[in-house]
Structures are given as C-alpha cells and as structure tokens.
Amino acid sequence: MRVGFDATPLLGARTGIGRYAQQLLEALADGPDEMVATAFTLRGRGGLTVPPGVKVRSRPLPARGLQEAWARSELPPAEWLTGWLDVFHATNFVLPPLRRARGVVTVHDLAFLRMTETVSAASARYRALVPRSLQRASVVVTPSDAVADQVREAYAPEVPVVAVPHGVGPQWAQAEPPDDTLRARLGLPHEYVLFVGTLEPRKDVGTLLAAHRLLPDAPPLVLVGPPGWGEQVDVSRAVTPGYLDEADLRPVVAGASALVLPSRDEGFGLPVLEAMAAGTPVVASDLPVLREVGRQHATYAAVGDAEAFAAALRAVLDQPGDAAARRAHAARFTWAASAEGHRAAYRLALQRG
C-alpha cells in the first residue's frame, strides 16, 4: 500500500499525540508499505523530520485555513498535497477530503464533546470537524476500547471503529533514575512524586496539589509538561522543569517515588504505561480507560477527590508493590504491535473501498 500519514503532530513540542505519531511512524517505516508523510502547516516539508525510508510530500499551507475549508467543503483533497495514495491516515482527529484514497482517522478522545469547558480553542473546533471526518472515513481508529465505545455512542458511525492501543518503547524498560548532572539541571530533589502532562483543566492538577498538601511528609511534587490553557492553578510549591524530551523524561519517570495522573478524562493515558515500563508505581483516576491500560498494576482514586488521591498515594508510598509485574504488564504494549493494528485498519479501509 501507499499510505499517506498526517505528520503534523511531529512539529513543535511532542506531547501525547506527537509522541504517538512519532513512534507509530517509526514502526510503520519498518513494514512493507510505502509511507508518505505530510504536514498541514505553513512550514510545509521543511519542518518535518521523518524516519529513513519515509517520503515527505507537503506544501506550505495554513492549517487553520485548511480546517476551515474542510469544515465547509470537500476541497482541497489530501492528494493535492501528497500525490496519489491508497490510504490516508489522519492521525489527529481531522480527516481531509480525499479523491480516491480510503480514509482512516484516529480519534484520541471525546473531551471536545464531553468536557467542552476544559479544551483549548483549537480542540473546540473538533466539534465541527470530527463529524465531517467520520463521514469521510472508511475506518475509525481509537487508542482504547473505552474511547471506541464513546465514539459509537456519540456518533453511531456507519464505518468500523477499531481500538488499537499505543505502545511503549524498549528504552523505558532500561531507564535508570536521573544522575546528579540531570538532577542539578532540572532542580530535582532526591525523592519526588511526579505528574507528567500539559497543565490544562482536563488533567486536574488542582486535585493532585490538594492531595499532596494532605500528606505533609510526602516527597516533593514535580510537575513535568508544557503550560496549557484555562484557569491556572498555583504551582509555586512544586518543582516545574517544564516540557522534557523523551531522553530526559525517561530517567525522571524512573526515579519517581510514584507517578500520579489525576485526569478527569483520558483517551489512553500514555504516562501510566510508560511509568509501569520503568517500574514506577502509579496512582491514577478511576476511569474505565485508565483501568483498561493499567489493570491491577495501578492504584485508582475517585476523579476529583483529593482525599481519595491522598490515601491512594500514601498507600503506594508505603508499599510500592511489584515493579517486575508492572514492567511485565507494560511489555505487552509495543509499537510494533500498534503498527500492525494500524496496518490492519488500513487493509480494512481498502476492503471497504
């Protein structure tokens, strides 16, 4: 197959969706299909760095303008930018119009629909763009069964909705706690409780801060991630190294006493999986999707309940549990398996031609 791949998420800081696109494209590049990466941006092909063997076909066009056109019409089709394709994979909610190629779209979550007050202005536009994408698609991909069920309930699409989990790279299983040089550069204490994610309302960092205050003897709190949007909480008592690339993030996660993810909603919860791969204990919101990913290897607390999070964190700090079991569970999720699941979705799209 000649597969077009929306690599726009590879531009800029790579948070969850960017890292999904990066790791998936690397795994797909090792397979039998011809991969053609494109980016819907004024930066065009010049801003894209792709794995060996992946072709880049792109033109410098404004993403916002393209999305406005796609919300109203079937122009311009993706093939105008990429050349001919068998399948086009829209990796980030928005499937452009297509001439002859079959379309596959990844819908990561439905926060833009279910939790409208928590999303950015860019994500709010998905309320108009995602229904059009589902109409154009031959197959819809989600990162979890929980999101697949939400998509079916919200939109009842006439095409298959296929759950394909994310993976975790083997480097995470080899991660060691940060050395003295990295600790000094990032201002890390010797022991710490860790959060990883964008500082935005859906992540509910306020609940984590409140829970941490209820445990005065707990290790200091470290918040890793870029600034977000919406009402900002007071993080002055936490260590905030900001966004970290994966090379720095892995040892920071491996060195944490626990990773806490207090999100009000998630599509997959990649920090949970990566922490487990590094052997780090996890406390997470009691959401169906996070139980789907963490199973019995994480400790769960009621969404938005600071006292419940404090109790769960206290329990994990006192008894961290079986690191080997966490690592073994995470090892079941590979990007190679995720790539094969996506290839199966591409083949299904062609069959539905």
Image (cartoon, helix red, strand yellow):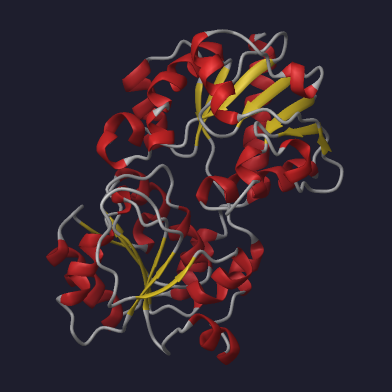
Measured as percent of width and height from the top left, residue 43 is found at 70, 39
Q: Residue at x 36, y 28 (%)?
A: 149
When the figure is inspected, residue 25 is found, relative to residue 323, above or below; the finding is above
Q: Is residue 328 shown above or below 1?
A: below
Report the side of 8 relative to 111 (left or right).
right
Q: Which is nearer the eye, 106 or 202?
A: 202
Is 307 positioned to the left or the right of 166 in the image?
A: left
Q: Is residue 179 above or below residue 157?
A: below
Number of on-image labels: 0
Query: Is residue 95 among what the camera can see?
Result: no
Q: Is residue 339 visible?
A: yes
The picture places residue 187, in percent across and down from the top left corner, at 46, 84
Q: Quadrant of residue 316?
A: bottom left
At horizontal 55% and vertical 69% (from top left) the residue drawn is 249
Residues 255 and 45: in front is: 45
Image point (65%, 63%), residue name: 170
Q: Nearer the viewer, residue 158 or 200?
A: 200
Residue most toward the right? 53
Q: Position of residue 121 (x, y in %)?
A: 38, 35
Query: Which image quarter is the N terminus in?
Result: top right
> Quadrant where the C terminus lies?
top right
Across and down, in percent, residue 64 comes to 54, 28
